[in-house]
Amino acid sequence: FGSSHCGSSDISRLPYRAGPKTRLPPPPSSATMALSLVRAARPSMLASARGFSSIPINKVARVLRMHVADEAAAMKMDALVGEIRDKLKSVKGYDKTVRTVCKAEWAYEVSAIFNSLDDFKAYDASEYRQELIPKMMKEVEALAKGGEIYSGVRVFDEE
């Protein structure tokens, strides 16, 4: 986009040309081959850690963030979170729910904590979640200011 040399058809810049007398690049050195093998193996080794090998994934949290209108809306949200928490207690690997509220901004955050990534993935893909969450999210959206809700997944640690 906008760079004159990116779409250039100047074939003289290519390292070799296709044709009857194709010049091949020089054979790779042992060091180049070793580096190539490491690069090829690396993605599969880190796939489960998503590239963050120094951050272990022990517990996992599903996080919801939103703003509510006032204290009355926050209290209604607390009641709704209590219902969701009661339903999640039957889910394998569910640990607890953590809620924070900023009373100055009426920022409301809630996290459902799971004991492992595998437990979270199993819950996230389950039919139980597919039935439970859409119904509950309609009520959450009604309490969220402007219906705006952020949802994400986090590594969760505490001491």
Image (tube, helix red, strand yellow):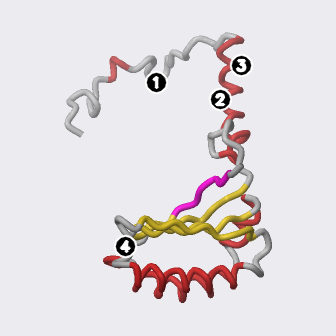
Task: Give the label, 2 or 4, closer to the camera.
Answer: 4
Q: Say above or below: 74 vs 38.
A: below
Mark 4 crowd level (few <14, some 14–19, many ≥20, 10 Å Cα):
some
**Residue for badge 3:** 34
Residue identifier under label 2: 39
Inspect this view and state whether residue 127 appears. Answer: no
Front tag of 4 and 1: 4
* Label 1 or label 3, whichever comes before in sequence order: 1
Residue 8 drawn in magenta: no
Q: Pointer 4 and pointer 1: residues touching (CB < 8 Å)?
A: no
Query: x%, y% of residue 124?
Result: 66, 71
First in sequence: mark 3 or mark 2? 3
Residue bounds of the magenta highlight: 152-157
Q: Distance between the residues labelled 1 and 2?
A: 31 Å
- Asked if disc 4 and disc 3 are in contact, CB closer than 8 Å, the reply is no
* Nearer-N-terminus badge (4/3): 3
